Amino acid sequence: SEMTVRDALNSALDEELARDDKVYVLGEEVGEYQGAYKITRGLLQKYGPDRVKDTPITEAGFTGIAVGSAFAGLRPVCEFMTWNFAMQAIDQIINSAAKTLYMSAGQINCPIVFRGPNGAAAGVAAQHSQCFASWYSSVPGLKVLAPYDSEDARGLMKAAIRDPDPVVFLENEILYGQAFPVTPQVLDKDFVLPIGKAKVMREGKHVTLVSFSKMVGYCLKAAEQLAKEGIDCEVINLRSIKPLDRDTLLASVKKTHKIISVEEGWPQCGVGSEISAVMMELAFDELDAPVLRVTGAEVPMPYAANLEAAALPQIDDIIKAVKSIA
Amino acid sequence: SEMTVRDALNSALDEELARDDKVYVLGEEVGEYQGAYKITRGLLQKYGPDRVKDTPITEAGFTGIAVGSAFAGLRPVCEFMTWNFAMQAIDQIINSAAKTLYMSAGQINCPIVFRGPNGAAAGVAAQHSQCFASWYSSVPGLKVLAPYDSEDARGLMKAAIRDPDPVVFLENEILYGQAFPVTPQVLDKDFVLPIGKAKVMREGKHVTLVSFSKMVGYCLKAAEQLAKEGIDCEVINLRSIKPLDRDTLLASVKKTHKIISVEEGWPQCGVGSEISAVMMELAFDELDAPVLRVTGAEVPMPYAANLEAAALPQIDDIIKAVKSIA
Amino acid sequence: ASPSIKVEVMPYKVHRIEAPSNVVETNVEELTNFYKLMYKMRRMEIAADMMYKAKFIRGFCHLYDGQEAVLTGIEAAITLKDSIITSYRDHCQHVSRGGSIVSLMAELMGKQEGATKGLGGSMHIYNRKNNFYGGNGIVGAQIPLGAGIALAHKYKGEPHVCITMYGDGAANQGQKYEALNMAGLWNLPAIFVCENNHYGMGTAEWRAAKSPNFYTRGDYIPGIKVDGMDVLAVKNAVAFAKAYALANGPIVMEMDTYRYHGHSMSDPGSTYRTRDEINAMRTERDPIERVKRLLLNNGVDPADLKKIDKEVKKEVDDAVEQAKQGQIPPLHWLWRNMYAEPLGAGMRGVLPAEYHVPAFDPTYKS
Amino acid sequence: ASPSIKVEVMPYKVHRIEAPSNVVETNVEELTNFYKLMYKMRRMEIAADMMYKAKFIRGFCHLYDGQEAVLTGIEAAITLKDSIITSYRDHCQHVSRGGSIVSLMAELMGKQEGATKGLGGSMHIYNRKNNFYGGNGIVGAQIPLGAGIALAHKYKGEPHVCITMYGDGAANQGQKYEALNMAGLWNLPAIFVCENNHYGMGTAEWRAAKSPNFYTRGDYIPGIKVDGMDVLAVKNAVAFAKAYALANGPIVMEMDTYRYHGHSMSDPGSTYRTRDEINAMRTERDPIERVKRLLLNNGVDPADLKKIDKEVKKEVDDAVEQAKQGQIPPLHWLWRNMYAEPLGAGMRGVLPAEYHVPAFDPTYKS
Ligand SMILES: Cc1ncc(C[n+]2csc(CCOP(=O)(O)OP(=O)(O)O)c2C)c(N)n1
Ligand SMILES: Cc1ncc(C[n+]2csc(CCOP(=O)(O)OP(=O)(O)O)c2C)c(N)n1
Ligand SMILES: [Mg+2]
Ligand SMILES: [Mg+2]
């Protein structure tokens, strides 16, 4: 059967709310409005206003409240309408949620999920299109997840909610409405994916493509086209950006000896930069070609559709990059 | 003659306040208290409360005010007591200051300097020790500078204030009291360093060490010791983290064929990751060894002196890294 | 000049300040201008709605119809040397500050003839020359920005104020309270205008604010509540506020208003409020109808108004057509105006080794 | 039980609420306990000052002497099941919440016997077991955190409140206003205690706040101003506030108090205020002297108090010595408790290819 990413997230939230009464959801428009992107549809009706809490548009405040409640033993799922708005609350995410367990010498953990759409959507311009994967992934104390398909969305969301640490959960608005096949196993109410493990989406022997979120789909499409030309790509879906699954990456490079990272975020100090640096340090002798990065262009996101497209990796860009080293 | 970094910053601010009456300074304790770290000493007395403005402890608010005033033609120098506190204001730095020129199609520029001590000091633990170089350097629209010595401090601060764009100026508390030799030229009231250019602090032919801020001094010391053992290091002081002076790095690597980055910040998606990725893409065939990163350990900063030292690169670490590839 | 007309507007509610008179002077000429401007705004937004549905416009698009009297009254009380800053709901400021309807429509369609050359889109429109500072997509962020613009006016010794517009949802943002405090400490000529349209997206004011009396939410800063559906009430109150702000410092204004459309194009606007409520607003408090009645009661020929209507409709329709004919921006505009001083430094494209030196070229000649 | 004593405290100032009686009941036993606890706090902070100057302590170190009555009065009115969260000025909460002086001093000295094993230092001390949530270095951040802890109490159906302590400087932070609004909307059992020691670092309250009447700054949330140098006034007011908060929701308390030391060890504390001001506080309003006078007036033998003094001094001195004998943490503790579930993932050390799997081990047995 098939399921959209939206329904995958919605059902995961629903089941985890049912499973553990310490879990609650808060954020702007999550309740009566059913979610700005309808991820929380039906949950208010099912679990009531104490467990599905509409907040005012005060990110710093409600994030701090969510974190405080997690210190005190609740398990909040804190929605940002988009991750851009979490910049108003980033101090609470970093200085309060991520660091307290360490600073308190293990006394106070913070079981919380921060979630919402990350990165570019369509036509929403510079202030609404930023990818925060690299920033959050730099911070010890956080776990950072980015689902691609419905399996990821369900399995990672459930893992994130059950995890005792703060998890930054980066969704993608454009994927919400996309349907993916799901097995009965994925629909099991205890279907939990391991945090910190990447998934090989397609095996291949010539070039490794590594990405996360929406770009996984682009890599798969690029791989399909390249296969027709005899270039056999391995496609890795990171799923977890922190911890980064170095082992899976290294195993793949030992096979292909060539690797390209693909992300929608800006290049400088991006996720691709990290992958490149890890390959340098841990697989230098395996590399038959430089590790390449395909990234969002280094510009604030423009509004016009053609410029927006030029500012983001397209399938053709991936193909070009592969061909440049294949 | 010699000058401390504190005096270098202070004199640069003083001269730029004198030079252009659109320049003003604001922040917590910058006026009557003379600066939490005395960088603004004497300025209130000289320029009065309209140009040296004490603010309440409300970073989001005063940063927004500073940015708004820059949109309207003033040239604020906005002090954060430390950069850790700027997380409360980062939305204004990124979404308002960095992006508006582009979003407004070139209509509204934002001539502002955001400054303050960045990264680890001594014994101030996890919430007061974070390095933000990589985050800010990822953002198109920002320029990011990090002075090492007094020459840097004067020349970059003056360049930053005269620049028409938003500049993130990352100082280091431990360097404030350190004295460095300065030439008469450095003391000239129009001594301005070019933004975007690195400085080769020491020429060498075996291994390139690239770093910024306090770590430049460590690299110089490591180079001195290694020289005694016949290993000749080139030491590059980035000065500018955005734009990154790729040309200077590439020229050096073409000579040494080996390069190591050194920074106090966390490793994942750090400045060193970017340098590694740039070398991959632009100098792969020049490399005789993997690009290595020496970084702050991936932990929230602990308080105890021995743990803090273990969490930060020491001169010996740099030496070890060099020897591992020299 | 047409003879003076005295109109009694709804009495102001005030907080820590004495209310100005609620008898407002106007005349047919002024009223006619108000009518024209507001009707233009209305038609523009209706056109934007249609163009959005026809897929000429994408992304977020927030319409101002229903709220026209607020901006129109503000503009009547200040000059183009006073500054305005607002949220993403910024189409009408573009025209009230001297921009053309064509450039608005072209911007919404992402064309190079647009107000921001297709770079900004609906939420990011500015007019630096006429002191309009946008067009800000982050809820609340414009509030300290506006205080900073006011600071610049004062610093430069100019007798101008900055009008900072924000919604009832934004009114709860912490940075508003920080900005109010500093504006108060520094006596900034800052007018904080809360456009209370009673909903922040789908959240009614009272669900988001423990105290939805927004004119009192400055606490120690004076405030005034105004019928924001009555352009005369707004004009009069803003004139009062401007004088106050220049002499004394910040003041908060709450404009009681209503948005007819949903929050943005993806919101039908009817799940969290009743059709009855919307209809009652339209029939009982519509700001354009109110001015129309005044004009008719003061002897204006209905035919004259019909003529205006027709002209405005045509102006908007023509603008839409012209905008449709606009060009999409050339690809190299991606690399323009990221920095006022680009320093010759290359910024990275999507692919490795693809670097571009962004030009500073606000005229987009190159 | 010792007989009841009735003491008249300074009348409370109130905002949107009726003041509780300012006649407080106590007895010699309670007063003696207050005296002991406050004197212990005083000696601890004096010891910390000395140890800092002797370079046993490094980094930031913020002392609480002068403000002892606030925390002591709070603890007298609540139980260990109620929660407390505060700023970096957190040494005394450690002992009032059941921690030892040795573990405080050891923490300040960065020893493994410390309250947070040398990981947290002066600003980051907690007692999860007794509901003390630290120890927060970012000004204002503890305010929404405290509201969140209150939310957890309510969510779990517990009849407990959270006391959130913050300074006059922090009182201007926007996140406070966001937290107050939500606490109000959700009727959280949250008591917001502004410790107004009249300075935020070197900035006098009136230079940082347009309205330094902090008990009124909740605006639509009730408030009460308390003589924070009088432990009985505090105890009584907090008991009142706790009952109020459990029944109704949030309340703001302003404690009028004073810090004797500079802001932190690097601040002499004498450039922005006069010696006279400090001396007047010490001689006229000292919270310990006030209780001492009460005890003596109620027939307590001065020798008994001397004995307490001596015992406390010895306890503190011994603790300091014991802390000095403590061990610095082993290096592998760098890699402890970064995650409650570390997942076996390696975190990077300073050098390449040096990865460590951080253990979750709150007992630091390994
Ligand atoms: C910080 C932030 N949070 C959330 C959003 C998403 N958002 C955009 S507009 C809006 C509602 C704002 O309501 P209000 O302030 O009343 O203004 P109105 O739209 O009614 O004019 C929200 C939640 C945002 N843009 N910025
Ligand atoms: C967000 C933030 N900004 C600045 C600082 C630096 N700082 C630490 S304490 C302090 C003064 C706080 O004063 P107040 O709130 O009155 O508390 P007190 O120290 O008097 O107890 C400042 C400015 C900080 N820690 N966090
Ligand atoms: Mg609204
Ligand atoms: Mg204080």
Image: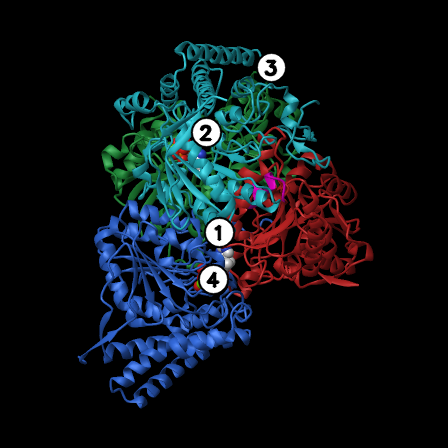
Chain colours: A green, B red, C cyan, D blue
- D12 and A130: which is toward the camera: D12
Q: Same subunit under labels 2 and 1?
A: no
Which residue position is annotated with label 3?
Answer: C327
- C72 and B145: which is toward the camera: C72
Which residue position is annotated with label 2?
Answer: C71
Which residue position is annotated with label 1?
Answer: B58
- Label 1 packing within 10 angstroms: few (<14), some (14-19), many (20+): many
* Residue B102 position within the rendered picture, expressed as x and y whole percent measured from the top left: 60, 31
Marks 3 and 2: which is nearer the front? 2
Predominant secondary structure in magenta?
Answer: helix
Marks 4 and 3: which is nearer the front? 3
Marks 4 and 1: which is nearer the front? 1
- Of helix, strand and loop, which one carries label 4? loop
Is C44 rendered above or below residue D259?
above
Is D158 rendered above or below residue C87?
below
- Residue under mark 3: which chain is it in? C
Q: Is residue B286 visible?
A: yes
* Residue B10 position within the rendered picture, expressed as x and y whole percent measured from the top left: 68, 58
Which residue position is annotated with label 4?
Answer: D119
- Of helix, strand and loop, which one carries label 3? loop
In the rendered structure, which amino acid carries the disc numbered 2? Answer: Leu
CA gap between label 3 and label 1 equals 45 Å
In the rendered structure, which amino acid carries the disc numbered 1? Answer: Thr
